Image (cartoon, grey):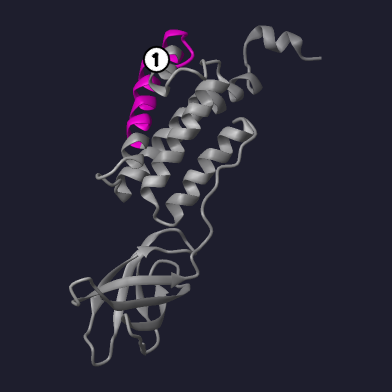
Amino acid sequence: MRISFFSGLEDGKFTLTGECPHCRVKAAFMPVTTSWHDERPLHDRWVAAMRCVSCSEFILGIIGFVKQADDSRTLEYLEHYPLGKPSQMTTGDIPEHILDDFNEALRCRSVEAYNATTEMCRRSLQASCEEQGADPSMNIDSQIDWMAAQGRITPFLREVAHTIRLAGNRGAHPPRKITEGEADAVISFTKEYFHAVYVSKAMLKRFDFSRSAAKKKP
């Protein structure tokens, strides 16, 4: 969530932009009440009820001037309520312990913990490599290459997997931070990988239209 407009100290009117906790769409939030001013030692806060321009549902938005180390104050978005429920993947085709790691990545994304998002995507990928037979004593780089050499993943999926691995490494080590767009991309890559390795294969078994499959039917 970000501040897109602030009228000034006199009335403290403000608007926000970000992902709506109700409709999950990136939208603007317009005030529907006057701002309530809460003066505190470390920061002044303005609080207002706001309405999403996409779905017309309401949130409580909070912004404030936050005191910095040099005694200056900067206007910042502080928080909003409700936070919304993080999206979670539900499928019986992906092993439970792998899905748990990936859903933790989605929960990290829901609170804008972008570094942690990519780290958990990397963890779920490594769990998948080991579930598919890769030696746990190998590092994830070697596990991915082993998967490709064994024909368990295609050259394209090998590239996808290494991208997830590198993003997770960057998220785990300073100073470079993962951005929102990068975190969303890594989530998409991980979904693509799991869909190919687990979901599509399971669907092919369920929907077999070959003649041999037809003969097996009673």
Q: Main secondary structure of the magenta part?
A: helix
* Residue under pointer 1: 145
Q: Is residue 166 magenta?
A: yes
The residue positioned 24% from the left and 92% from the top of the image is: 10
Q: Is residue 106 magenta?
A: no
In the image, residue 121 sits, relative to residue 104, either above or below, namely above
| Three-letter amino acid code at the position of disc 1 | Asp
The residue positioned 21% from the left and 86% from the top of the image is: 8
Whether residue 195 is visible here, answered yes or no, is: no
Q: Quadrant of the C terminus?
A: top right
In the image, residue 55 sits, relative to residue 208, either above or below, namely below
Would residue 107 appear left or right of 6 to someone viewing this image?
right
Residues in magenta, as a range: 147-167
Label 1: few (<14), some (14–19) or many (≥20) C-alpha neighbours in 10 Å: some
Name the spot of residue 181 as percent of width and height, x first. 30, 47
Whether residue 69 is visible here, answered yes or no, is: yes
In the image, residue 117 sits, relative to residue 203, either above or below, namely below
**Helix or strand or loop: what does disc 1 sit on?**
helix
Name the spot of residue 91 as percent of width and height, x first. 61, 37
The residue positioned 33% from the left and 85% from the top of the image is: 41
Would residue 90 appear left or right of 181 to someone viewing this image?
right
Name the spot of residue 213 as percent of width and height, x first. 69, 11
Q: Quadrant of residue 182?
A: top left
The residue positioned 39% from the left and 14% from the top of the image is: 145
Would residue 26 appear left or right of 110 to someone viewing this image?
left
Q: How many marks?
A: 1
